[in-house]
Image: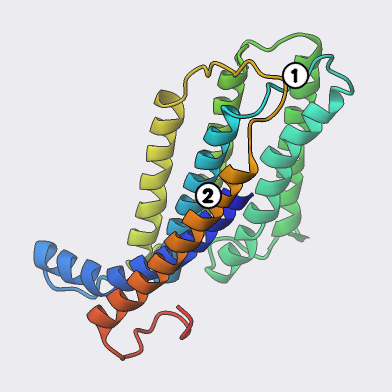
Amino acid sequence: MLVTGFFGGFGFAMATFLKLVEVKYVPMTLSYLFGESAWQTNWHSILEQTYGFLNGVGVGVAMACLARRVPPCSDEPRLRRWTEVAAVAFVLLLITFVNVIQNVPNWIRAAAIPARLYDLPSRLWFGTGYAVLALVVILLLFRHLRQRLALIPESRLGKAQLLYLVFLWWVVIGNLMRAIPPFQEQRLITEGVIHLVAVLCTLFALLWPGLLRLPDMAAASITGRMILTITCLGLIATAATVAFASWGTRAIHGGAFVGHAGYHT
């Protein structure tokens, strides 16, 4: 928690600073390479994506440290296996649904679909189709508990990769479907960055992980001195990040309000 907390603070300050750099230099660079144009996008969305990336790095660093300093945790014997189905269904079906269902009003406003189909709300049709898909997925997951489906890998690493990639591209495609009607120029950079990040995540998720040799220990090897060291380094890094971001913003934009957000960013 301590490591991820410091990464969260670092990520917010640095992502905001990088956004302010991009606001000035990305349009300038693209205009130089491809010709004069407005080259504007949803810069706040770029900030959110950058911040999410840095948070992910923080979680990865924290987990890598813990994996070598805490004893292995066994899930055996596996009790109440229905909770495994509930966990996967919550991530793949519920989280995606509450986000993707918001596409329907956007499609209606863009006149991509009518508000009602056969005198029933379009939102109801969408929800019904999603419910059918959810039912099939849940039935297959329960079937997998009794007899393994060939699609699902045997190793835990393979299962984690499959879950991650399905969820990742489900969300990416759902987001793209919201942006398509109508797809305008300012969405190109935003959606392009999302697509590029998803492609890189796919590459890293499949090529980077390996089987980790778990430590042979009975208790965690996290000491008070280690926590104190992390705290001191985190505070120093936080102060340095804020100072650098403040100096860099002033050096690039001076005292002028940059725009594209409130004064706090």
Q: SS of the residue at dot 1?
A: loop
Cα distance between the residues tagged 1 and 2 = 30 Å
CA neighbours of label 1 inside 10 A, class few (<14), some (14 to 19), many (20+): few
Q: Say left or right for 128 vs 173.
A: right
Q: Amino acid at mark 1?
A: Ser
- Kindly identify the residue that appears in the image at 42 percent across and 51 percent down: 194
Where does residue 253 sit, x and y in percent of width and height?
A: 26, 83
**Which residue is drawn at the image coordinates 64% and 31% (left, top)?**
221
The type of residue carrying mark 2 is Thr
Query: Closest to the observer: 201 or 136?
Result: 201
Q: Quadrant of the C terminus?
A: bottom left
Residue to which mark 1 is pinned = 74
Residue 182 visible from this viewpoint:
no
Residue 88 falls in image quadrant: top right
Q: Which secondary structure, mark 2?
A: helix
In the figure, 231 relative to 62: above or below? below
49 or 177, which is in the foreground?
49
Residue 217, position in %: x, y?
Answer: 66, 19
Vertical comparison of 94 with 114: above or below: above
Is 91 left or right of 44, judged from the image as shown?
A: right
- Direction right: furthest residue: 80
Residue 229 numbered mark, or none: 2
Q: Percent position (x, y) of residue 126?
A: 69, 50
